[in-house]
Amino acid sequence: MDNALKGLVLAAGVVLTCMILGLGFYIAREAKATASVSANRLTQYRAQLEEGSLLNYDGLTVSGNEVVNLTKRLVGSYSEGKEAPIIVTIRMKKSSWIYKNRTNTSKLRDSTSDRYIPPQSEFVVHIRQDDNDVITSITLEEN
């Protein structure tokens, strides 16, 4: 009888250990799935915040100073050879330029350059989005 009791205790211990391990693996799997979903939603939320602030500009008239700041903010971190996800086009009365990276953005404030944008000039902002409502380009047209 003593051996039978030890066998039952050993079997109960094995079953209990298996249940605890199974529960631990289940919790770990659920936590991984929750973390993945949370990371994806956080990325989407960040994109909405960034693009939402840009969408507020659509149709507005902004100063030349804001045009320079916006252009540098959108393409200024992309070196030559790389392309920003949002293309900035600046149309002035006599010419227009496309900015895909920081190349030539320093000329926007250089009064001796043909790309100079006077701070007091006014531009109308036009924003283009693709079929997925992602902003692809911003056109700044001088009034």
Image (cartoon, grey):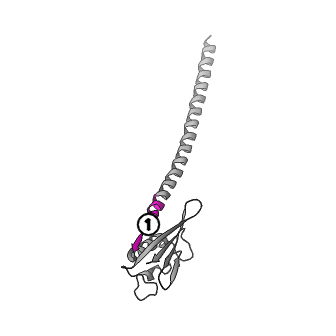
Q: Which residues are magenta?
A: 49-62
Q: Classify mark 1: helix, strand or loop.
A: loop
- Going by the numbered disc 1, the residue's amino acid type is Tyr
Reply above or below: 35 against 134: above
**Vertical placement of 73 versus 11: above or below?**
below
Q: Which image quarter: residue 7?
A: top right
Give residue 130's position: percent from left, percent from top: 58, 63
Name the spot of residue 46 as percent of width and height, x first. 47, 57
Is residue 61 located in the magenta-colored stretch of the structure?
yes
Q: Residue at x 49, y 81 (%)?
A: 104
The residue at the point 56 percent across, 40 percent down is 30
- Front in this rendered view, residue 14 or 92: 92
- Give the answer, above or below, for where 33 lies relative to 142: above
Front residue of this view, candidates 20 and 113: 113
Q: Any magenta on residue 96?
A: no
Residue position marked by numbered label 1 in the rendering: 57
